[in-house]
Image (cartoon, helix red, strand yellow):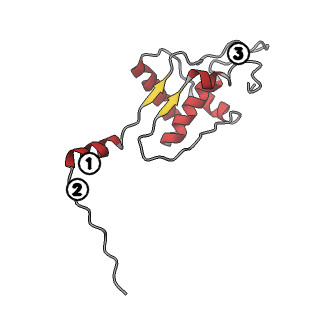
Amino acid sequence: MSSWSPTKYKTRNWPSYNTALKQRGSLPIWFDPEMVWVPPPGGKRGRQRQFSDAAIQACLTLKVLLGLPLRQTTGFVESLLQLVGLDWAVADFSTLCRRQRTLNVSLQYRGGTGPLNLLIPSRALLRDTLPGSGQHRH
């Protein structure tokens, strides 16, 4: 029985190898400025929601992807919004905690070898916030 020996690779193109290693740490995140962050009035009595389901799902998606606690998620989303120049308020950790119990967050996974791109489009998330869409959660 022969002993196992690791495969030896010789890197011949160092510039592209270094570029590929740097791109592994890339995490571009885009926020659509037309996204419905604050929901329209629900037409019911009582206090209206300050954040749409899309806004809560965006925060919780980042929480799950990056493995952050709720308070750090709030700070992270605040800094992202500030970096892109959006003056949107961010839900505090207690709002995220309360809303995550009733919000169904579905992440579609598709394996790949390229960089991970997280898109937050307004049109795809808009259907979750409009009354009468059949998917509005109370």
In the shown orientation, is residue 90 left or right of residue 127?
Answer: left
Write the residue at 62% across / 25% down.
Answer: 125
Name the spot of residue 37 as percent of width and height, x first: 58, 19
Q: Amino acid at mark 3?
A: Gln
Kind of residue indicated by mark 2: Thr
| Residue at point 46%, 16% (across, down) | 86
Q: Alpha-carbon distance for marks 1 and 3?
A: 52 Å
Task: Return the residue at label 1.
Answer: 17
Q: Residues within 10 Å of mark 1 (few under 14, many from 20)?
A: few
Residue 46 in picture, x, y percent from top left: 76, 14
Q: Is residue 69 above or below residue 87?
A: below
- Given this view, does label 3 or label 2 mark the residue nearer the observer? 2
For marks 3 and 2 on the same chain, the one whose residue lies earlier in the sequence: 2
Alpha carbon of mark 3 to alpha carbon of mark 2: how far? Answer: 59 Å
The reply, left or right, for residue 91 in relation to residue 28 is right
Residue depicted at x 47% and y 46%? 112
- Measured as percent of width and height from the top left, residue 17 is found at 26, 48
Q: Of the residues shown, which amino acid type is indicated by label 1?
A: Tyr
